[in-house]
Image (cartoon, rainbow, N blue to C red):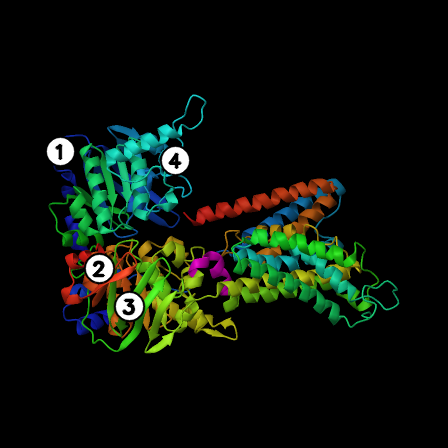
């Protein structure tokens, strides 16, 4: 099977890769790039061409080498071998500033803005317009920013402090900042991962206008729909190797997945029909002052309840409140018919709940610790401890079994979690919660920023857990995921529930209708 | 394990097509099974610190022969003095190590030494001393002054921990406050006078190699606590990511209170030992001990960022500090230079820590 995919890849295909205006010299050409880290070759003889006025998507599972390649193009990493040709000239990129001065700007996945400074100050940082005395000319600063935003059709107050902005707005500011450098090449690393559909649409408008101005945009994404919507062509990478470049009009979704994983995933959402049991979790009029109110729903054993809504609609806050991270200010929670008061995560755990948080880095991983230590953190309050001492032998055996069940790609449990790809980190965190044998599992964006293969595995696992009678609440911004996985969908808008849809009644339109009310 | 998954999905989910039975996925699973430990031999993190200790010792050994014409290391008396002098710092450092693993800091240790030294000394005075602090409480069994010292240390630690857990103030500020206050308490308690004329039993604690044994026992106990108990595991988890620790069901506040209380307790023990060694309790004791302890911990490889650090490293860090100070005296470098060099060493250790963090972060 994997042979089949590699058979497709050969140079013949790649040779006539930039099919349209093949005559024009590419804006940016990468050839024979190799980059190794201690113990691993991240990129091996990789190359691709970016043409001016196109959006070029880079696809591949996490760990395929896309991010490393991006960092090389942005001057963050120095390649061990290989050539970078920019507008016909061979260049070496020594640092991000060097890359920026040559016209390559990167918009980072983790936003790099200073929260206490204004939007304008952030955009023009280190390049502030100065007045006759050498002081920052704030008038010009705000005028320039307003002008820049007008050309990009961005509606953000240049005087606003960045910390008051939503994630989407900050993303826009980052993009504006990159554009303000008059860059020819813009690198976007999963720019939509924290955006709602409407914000994504806005982003795409901006990208299209940048494309029309002749800029080359390198776009990393895991979302297949985006590829077809925005990208002109795309290159696929797998395990640090270049696989192929194609026009996005000449392939199907399945072709791409096949190229990315070297295998077919014909069913993305393996939702199983399982018998639905008794009500396990019953939430009535749950509220948190100033954030959400009157949230009521039930989850039955074996049921997957999806939670949809725009970013800022309060979905994650509901999850945090259910789990005692931010105790509720109103309402009741019943578990198996019994009223419970959950005001700390410890109590939630004792009630048989588990909570995979939205932000792996902030509230999930212990980055300084290894896989074993990351996996056993939650279960130690329940099991594997006798007289205060950890029964490490049994614990280690069970953690290894869990890692294997979840197919965590690692040679051993002593590996630092920060050396794993996002998908594998997520699997370790899922393992942390599964070790506690939860009856109620809350998943907040369980597949955000992870690759297609890991995504399918997590979907299958969620489905499997439901079949074992676990009650599941799954928050997701990805519409296909919510629609594909959920038995029912709770839709939220501005802090309250606007509707609960049955699987059979739910489609993109009906959910969006409730979410954007 | 792949076959088990296949059975599961294909039998219960007829609508799930053959994706799981795909041979490519099977080939994906042929990789070696996950093992508990890395197959490759890895030097423990302490190895490099131990090398530094050996290197510094050899440096002074060479200088010793050159300047003084005698050996630096192979001198039993000197070795004893080094360890003895450093054991008080070592006792404190074991507690500070745990505090720093939780990504906190404790600046109050030195003042706690003073406060506990004067309190425990006041309960260890002999009855034929006319100016005893508590004339009714003289010639007490040695357990009382020790318990009093431990209690005072724990109470200050409890205060530190509660401030840090229940208010939003950073550990630096909380322990800075108690640092000043505890020193003030010690001065008020003694009226500036030394508390002297202590019982022989009490003085015995600080005599001979006893402080060393106390230090080593404490080091062993907390080595075991950190490596083999749930309390230890939670300590690392909190230091690595406090939010994630809380979401994982760890009672972070309670744990932090315990950590600072233990640090206070150990400083309290160090205070009693200091008083016993000097056969006197004085409010000026333990000045800058907190910085020596922090230096030893950081030199020992504990990261100020939190989540990393071992007692073995701290013990080696304490020895490095001791060897350096003794070595400088040995080659007759002025005490004022010593402090400057000590300052430089602390900064170098932190730079090394950041370099390691950067390397780990790839």
- As rendered, which of A74 and A355 lies closer to the eye? A355
On the picture, is A362 further left or further right than B67?
Answer: left
Measured in 3D between alpha carbons, the distance from the residue under mark 1 to the one under mark 2, in whole angstroms, is 37 Å
Is label 1 on the same chain as label 4?
A: yes
User: Which tag is nearer the camera, tag 1 or tag 4?
Assistant: 4
On the picture, is B59 further left or further right than A233?
Answer: right
Q: Is residue A387 magenta?
A: no
On the picture, is A164 further left or further right than A213?
Answer: right
Is label 4 on the same chain as label 2?
A: yes
Image location (x, y in percent) of residue B175? 60, 54
* Residue B38 visible from this viewpoint: no
- Find the magenta span and give its range: B233-244
Residue tagged 2: A481
Residue tagged 3: A296
Q: Residue at x 73, y 48 (%)?
A: B71
> Which labelled disc corresponds to residue A21?
1
Q: Secondary structure at mark 4?
A: helix
User: Which tag is nearer the camera, tag 2 or tag 3?
Assistant: 3
SS majority, magenta: helix
Is label 1 on the same chain as label 3?
A: yes
């Amino acid at each position: 099977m994997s042979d089949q995919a590699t058979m497709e890849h050969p140079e013949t295909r790649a040779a006539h890769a930039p099919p349209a205006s093949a005559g024009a010299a590419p804006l940016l050409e990468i050839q024979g790039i190799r980059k190794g880290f201690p113990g691993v070759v991240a990129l091996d003889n990789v190359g691709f061409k970016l043409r001016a006025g196109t959006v070029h998507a880079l696809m591949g599972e996490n760990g395929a080498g896309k991010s490393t390649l991006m960092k090389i193009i942005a001057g963050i990493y120095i390649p061990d071998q290989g050539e970078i040709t920019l507008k016909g000239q061979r260049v070496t990129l020594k640092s991000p500033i060097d890359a920026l001065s040559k016209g390559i700007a990167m918009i980072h996945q983790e936003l790099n803005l200073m929260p206490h400074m204004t939007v304008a100050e952030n955009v023009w940082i280190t390049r502030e317009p100065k007045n006759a005395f050498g002081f920052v000319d704030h008038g010009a600063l705000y005028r320039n920013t307003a002008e820049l935003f007008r050309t990009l059709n961005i509606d953000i107050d240049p005087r606003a402090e960045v910390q008051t902005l939503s994630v989407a707005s900050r993303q826009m500011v980052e993009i504006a900042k990159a554009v303000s450098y008059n860059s020819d090449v813009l690198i976007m690393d999963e720019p939509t991962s924290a955006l709602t559909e409407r914000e994504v649409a806005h982003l795409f408008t901006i990208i299209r206008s940048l494309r029309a101005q002749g800029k080359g945009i390198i776009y990393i994404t895991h979302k297949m729909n985006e590829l077809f919507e925005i990208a002109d062509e795309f290159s696929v990478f797998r395990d640090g190797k270049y696989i192929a470049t194609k026009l996005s009009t000449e392939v199907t979704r399945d072709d791409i997945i096949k190229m990315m994983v070297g295998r077919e995933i014909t069913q993305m959402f393996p939702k199983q029909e399982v018998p639905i049991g008794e009500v396990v979790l019953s939430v009535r009029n749950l509220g948190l002052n100033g954030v959400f109110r009157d949230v009521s729903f039930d989850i039955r054993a074996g049921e997957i309840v999806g939670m949809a809504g725009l970013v800022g609609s309060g979905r994650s806050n509901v999850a945090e409140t259910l789990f005692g991270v931010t105790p509720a200010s109103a309402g009741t929670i019943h578990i198996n018919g019994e009223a419970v008061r959950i005001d700390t995560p410890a109590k939630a755990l004792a009630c048989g709940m588990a909570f995979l948080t939205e932000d792996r880095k902030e509230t999930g991983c212990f980055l300084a610790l290894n896989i074993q230590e990351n996996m056993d953190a939650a279960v130690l309050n329940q099991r594997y401890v006798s007289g205060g001492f950890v029964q490490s032998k049994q614990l280690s055996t069970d953690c290894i079994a869990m890692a294997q069940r979840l197919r965590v790609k690692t040679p051993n449990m002593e590996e630092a979690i920060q050396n794993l790809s996002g998908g594998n980190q997520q699997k370790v965190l899922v393992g942390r919660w599964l070790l506690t044998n939860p009856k109620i599992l809350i998943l907040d964006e369980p597949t955000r920023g992870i690759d297609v293969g890991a995504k399918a595995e997590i979907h299958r696992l969620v489905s499997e857990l439901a079949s074992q009678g676990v009650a599941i609440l799954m928050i997701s911004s990805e519409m296909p995921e919510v629609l594909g996985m959920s038995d029912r969908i709770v839709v939220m808008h501005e802090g309250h529930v606007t509707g609960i849809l049955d699987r059979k009644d739910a489609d993109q339109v009906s959910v969006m209708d409730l979410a954007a009310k | 394990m792949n076959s088990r998954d296949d059975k599961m999905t294909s039998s219960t989910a007829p609508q799930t097509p053959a994706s799981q039975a795909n041979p490519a996925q099977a080939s994906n699973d042929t990789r070696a099974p996950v093992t508990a430990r890395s197959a490759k031999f890895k030097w423990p993190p302490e190895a490099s610190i131990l090398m530094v200790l050996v290197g510094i010792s050899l440096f002074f050994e060479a200088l010793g022969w050159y300047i003084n014409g005698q050996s630096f290391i192979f001198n039993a008396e000197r070795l004893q003095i080094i360890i003895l002098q450093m054991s008080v710092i070592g006792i404190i450092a074991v507690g500070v190590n745990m505090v720093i693993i939780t990504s906190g800091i404790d600046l109050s240790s030195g003042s706690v030494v003073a406060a506990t030294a004067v309190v425990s000394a006041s309960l260890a005075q002999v009855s034929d001393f006319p100016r005893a602090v508590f004339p009714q409480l003289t010639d007490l069994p040695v357990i009382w002054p020790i318990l009093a010292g431990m209690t005072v240390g724990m109470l200050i630690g409890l205060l530190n921990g509660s401030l840090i857990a229940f208010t939003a103030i950073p550990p630096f500020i909380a322990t800075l406050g108690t640092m000043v206050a505890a020193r003030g308490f010690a001065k008020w308690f003694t009226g500036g006078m030394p508390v002297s004329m202590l019982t022989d039993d009490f003085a015995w604690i600080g005599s001979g190699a006893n402080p060393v044994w106390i230090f080593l026992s404490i080091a062993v106990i907390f080595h075991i606590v950190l490596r083999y108990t749930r309390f230890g595991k939670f300590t690392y988890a909190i230091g690595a990511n406090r939010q994630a620790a809380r979401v994982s069901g760890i009672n972070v506040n309670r744990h932090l209170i315990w950590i600072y209380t233990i640090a206070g307790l150990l400083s309290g023990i160090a205070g009693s030992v200091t008083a016993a060694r000097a056969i006197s309790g004085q409010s000026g004791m333990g000045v800058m001990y907190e910085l020596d302890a922090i230096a030893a911990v950081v030199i020992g490889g504990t990261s100020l960022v939190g989540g990393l650090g071992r007692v073995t490293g701290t013990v080696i860090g304490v020895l490095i500090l001791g060897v350096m100070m003794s070595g400088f005296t040995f080659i007759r470098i002025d005490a004022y230079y010593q402090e400057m060099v000590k300052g430089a060493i602390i900064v170098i250790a932190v730079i090394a820590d950041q370099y390691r963090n950067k390397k780990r972060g790839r």
